[in-house]
Amino acid sequence: MSRTALLLMDLQVSHLSHVPDTYLPHAVRALHTARAAGVPVLHVALRLRPGHTDAHPRNKVFGALPPHLFTADDPGAAIHPNVAPADGEIVVHKNRISAFAGNDLQQVLAAQGIEHLVLAGIATGGIVLSTALQAVDLDYQVTVLSDACADPNPALHDTLVHDVLARRGEVTTVAEWGRALGAGA
């Protein structure tokens, strides 16, 4: 079996304010399931340079953000305490939508011998979709935890999970993934 890692993506305070309160317990459950099964956890978070010198004004997503958001000093950019990294868990900062953008994630995964990525995060139409597509192109096996992903647009989440992501990898729930790992959930 290939070595697996859970990517918890954009579980930052600000992002969580755009999805239902019922979402976070699923992400917490995914984190606890991975830890109980000995699956490495990598946290991916959006972090831009002060003044957003790394965000082009033409970029509709990042160019429109006020320059104080998602910087190291922004409290809303912090990873939510309920899913905070434990000692030894890797945190990777990105500066675009994909978890692979502007960082050394691919190098870290290679160094750890990771071949299978399990994805959880906000938003399904953003980091989950872009990371899944890029991971498939990079020949990773991909599993999307449907209930540990969320989008401000629930209809978009459902379409992406069932009609797009399921064609490119496995889609399952946290509970089903836990049972497959033998870790319970």
Image: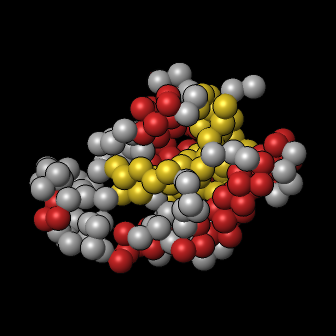
List x then y, in percent, for residue 141.
62, 28
List x then y, in percent, for residue 182.
87, 45
Q: Is residue 104 above or below residue 55?
A: above
- Colour convention of the picture: secondary structure
Task: State which quarter of the image contains the C terminus.
Answer: bottom right
The residue under the point 47% across, 24% down is: 138
Residue 53: quarter of image: bottom left
The residue under the point 55% across, 33% down is: 112
Q: Is residue 147 above or below residue 81?
A: above
Q: In this view, does 50 lie to the left or right of 18?
A: left
The residue under the point 77% across, 48% down is: 37
List x then y, in percent, for residue 81.
54, 74
Question: What is the residue that sits farthest to the front in this orientation?
Answer: 87
Q: In front here: 151 or 118?
A: 118
Asked whether residue 166 is in view, the answer is: no
Q: Is residue 136 left or right of residue 78?
A: right
The residue under the point 60% across, 50% down is: 41
Q: In this view, does 182 lie above or below 10?
A: above
Residue 72: quarter of image: bottom left
Number of marks present in the image shown:
0
Q: In this view, does 177 lie to the left or right of 23?
A: right
Q: In front here: 3 or 160?
A: 3
Q: In front here: 75 or 164?
A: 75
Task: State which quarter of the image contains the N terminus.
Answer: top right
Asked whether residue 143 is in view, the answer is: yes
List x then y, in percent, for residue 93.
37, 52
Q: In front here: 181 or 26?
A: 181
